[in-house]
Image (cartoon, rainbow, N blue to C red):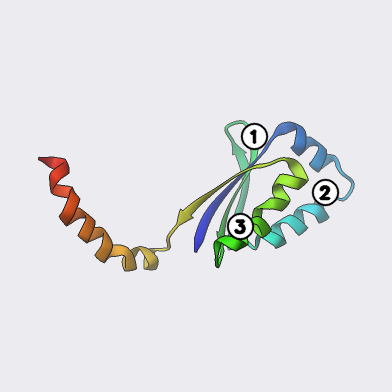
Amino acid sequence: MHFLAKITIPTEGGNKFVSSKNFNERMDDLMSGLKPEAAYFCVADGHRTIFALVNLDSAADIPRAIEPFWLAMGANVDLIPAMTQAEFGKAMPGLKQSVEKYGKSMTT
């Protein structure tokens, strides 16, 4: 299942992390454990932030993927379920069913 991971790094923990002698190696290790399909490093809400698209086979993979970010820098991690366009297409029958059952009652 695809997730959009938003990894928000608090200033104090981030400062310690980026100031360490082996910063590059530690970041490479964290990202290789996360195994993102894509990753973007930016500033969001005033904090160092990583947005990464990850594919996890099961809920049991969540600790392996995100626990290192909590331990290494005290990051806040949000996992947002996400779908590819093809997956969204497969969801159409269920979506149509919901619209037929509930959509009319919401507009009347």
Q: Decide which of tag 2 and tag 3 comes sooner along the chain.
A: 2
State yes or no: discs 2 and 3 in contact (Cβ < 8 Å).
no
Disc number for residue 47: 1
Where's residue 80, x and y in %? 49, 50
- Which residue is located at x 62 percent, y 42 percent? 42
Secondary element under disc 1, as helix, strand or loop, is strand
Q: Which of 75 and 39 lies nearest the eye of the viewer?
A: 75
Q: In the displayed orientation, state which residue is furthest to the right.
A: 21
Tag 1: amino acid: His
Secondary element under disc 3, as helix, strand or loop, is helix
- Which residue is located at x 80 percent, y 53 percent? 26
State yes or no: discs 1 and 2 in contact (Cβ < 8 Å).
no
Q: In the displayed orientation, state which residue is furthest to the front.
A: 60
Tag 2: amino acid: Phe
Secondary element under disc 2, as helix, strand or loop, is helix
- Which residue is located at x 65 percent, y 57 percent? 65
Above or below — where is 65 with respect to 42? Answer: below
- Residue indicated by mark 3: 62
- Residue indicated by mark 2: 23
